């Protein structure tokens, strides 16, 4: 009996010692022995030409970093406005098999804007390569710093075209609806269908740039918006589009395309409806004289679409009413006086101003799409 007890104790000790031995063999220390070194920039002076945004502008090459044991290494290329890299911008992150990275004119211009460089003024851009292990960027080593002189151009922001089941136009890219653009901001008051999907295109076609939410669940080439309103999310069943979770109605979509900002905000319009029994024009049009009680009625021609034909002079100025009074239903040129072709509701509009020649024109107002047109009749 005692022999059995001793045997069991002996076997238990052997197992414990064996496990400890295995654990010791699994503890491997990884140290960096050399850092990644920037070997060359393809140029020391770079004048960016806005006419060729897709052209290769700069190539960065480096020696591979090495560690005491074989391991997966990643490289991050950073740019900065100072050699201390106080606020660096990441140009790219590449895998261990790469030894160089090439950046286009547009990419370098975007980086210049993110660093605060002024258009058409030469500036010093400092660059370095960081090597690291794992997703947490552990055991990071930093290369030497190399600089170049760069002259950026005036940044042009993308145009955004909305398309999808949630939108006014459906899934036909050729009919995608462009947003009004003012510098870094693009915005529109338009119809959105609750519970449906949409995305933004950079052109009237699928081929090219597509814009959606910047999340791991979104297709890499579609990732763009860094922040968004709570009524937007990534659909559960696809990785290309945006899910609109709000109620159906008219919304103001605002995109801030500033480099590194890239936000989208969707808020209900002050006038969420679009299908009114009557719509009226008021102003120095059709002899109206800005008297709302004698505002001229438009003809309903579709779902939220109205028309009126009249002669227009060089000083034409008018607004759109949902009643023959200065009431709650009031539309005009978006965000102020002008002739942009985009509608804004009361509180966010101005007069529609048009230079006519005394000829006959058809005015079309589409409250559902948030647009208007003024077309001369032959």
Image: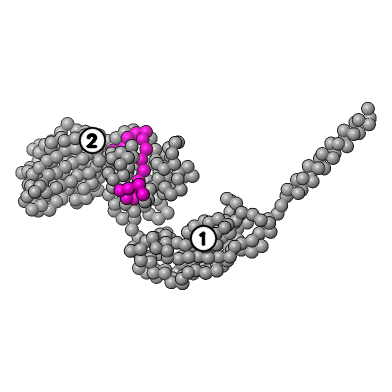
Q: Is residue 182 left or right of residue 111?
A: left
Depth order, front residue of 207/354: 207
Extreme residue toward the bottom, this view: 44
Q: Give me the disc on residue 272.
A: none
Q: Give me the disc on residue 77.
A: 1
Extreme residue toward the top, this view: 1
Number of residue marks: 2
Q: Give the range drawn in magenta.
A: 191-207
State whether residue 310 appears in this view: yes
Q: Locate residue 304, reporting x and y percent.
A: 21, 36
State whether residue 160 appears in this view: no
Considering only vertical position in the picture, is 248 above or below 360?
Answer: above
Depth order, front residue of 228/218: 218
Q: Is residue 201 left or right of residue 101?
A: left
Q: Name the residue under label 2.
A: 274
Q: Locate residue 333, reporting x and y percent.
A: 21, 47
Considering only vertical position in the picture, is 129 above or below 367?
Answer: below
- Whether residue 307 is in magenta: the answer is no
């Amino acid at each position: 009996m005692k022999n059995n007890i001793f045997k069991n104790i002996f076997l238990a000790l052997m197992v414990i010692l064996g496990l400890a031995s295995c654990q010791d063999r699994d503890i491997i220390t990884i140290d960096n022995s050399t850092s990644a070194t920037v070997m060359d920039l393809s140029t020391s002076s770079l004048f960016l030409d806005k006419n060729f945004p897709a052209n290769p502008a700069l190539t960065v090459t480096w020696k591979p970093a090495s560690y005491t044991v074989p391991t997966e290494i990643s490289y991050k290329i950073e740019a900065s406005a100072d050699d201390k890299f106080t606020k660096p911008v990441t140009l790219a992150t590449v895998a261990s098999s790469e030894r160089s990275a090439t950046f286009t004119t547009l990419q370098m211009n975007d980086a210049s804007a993110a660093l605060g460089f002024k258009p058409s003024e030469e500036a010093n851009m400092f660059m370095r390569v960081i090597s690291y292990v794992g997703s947490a960027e552990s055991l990071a080593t930093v290369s030497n710093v190399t600089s170049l002189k760069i002259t950026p151009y005036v940044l042009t922001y993308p145009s955004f075209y909305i398309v999808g089941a949630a939108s006014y136009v459906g899934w036909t890219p050729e009919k995608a609806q462009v947003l009004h653009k003012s510098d870094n901001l693009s915005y529109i008051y338009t119809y959105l269908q609750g519970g449906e999907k949409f995305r933004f295109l950079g052109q009237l076609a699928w081929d090219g740039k597509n814009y959606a939410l910047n999340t791991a669940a979104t297709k890499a080439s579609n990732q763009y918006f860094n922040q968004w309103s709570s009524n937007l999310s990534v659909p559960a069943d696809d990785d290309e589009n945006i899910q609109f979770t709000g109620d159906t109605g008219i919304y103001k979509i605002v995109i801030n395309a500033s480099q590194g900002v890239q936000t989208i905000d969707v808020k209900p319009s002050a006038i969420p409806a679009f299908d009114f029994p009557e719509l009226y024009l008021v102003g120095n049009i059709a002899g109206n004289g800005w008297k709302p009680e004698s505002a001229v009625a438009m003809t309903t021609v579709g779902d939220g679409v109205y028309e009126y034909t009249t002669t227009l002079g060089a000083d034409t100025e008018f607004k759109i009413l949902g009643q023959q009074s200065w009431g709650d239903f009031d539309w005009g040129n978006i965000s102020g006086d002008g002739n942009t072709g985009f509608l804004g509701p009361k509180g966010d509009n101005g007069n529609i101003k048009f230079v006519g020649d005394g000829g006959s024109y058809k005015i079309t107002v589409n409250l559902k799409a948030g647009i208007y047109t003024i077309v001369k009749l032959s």
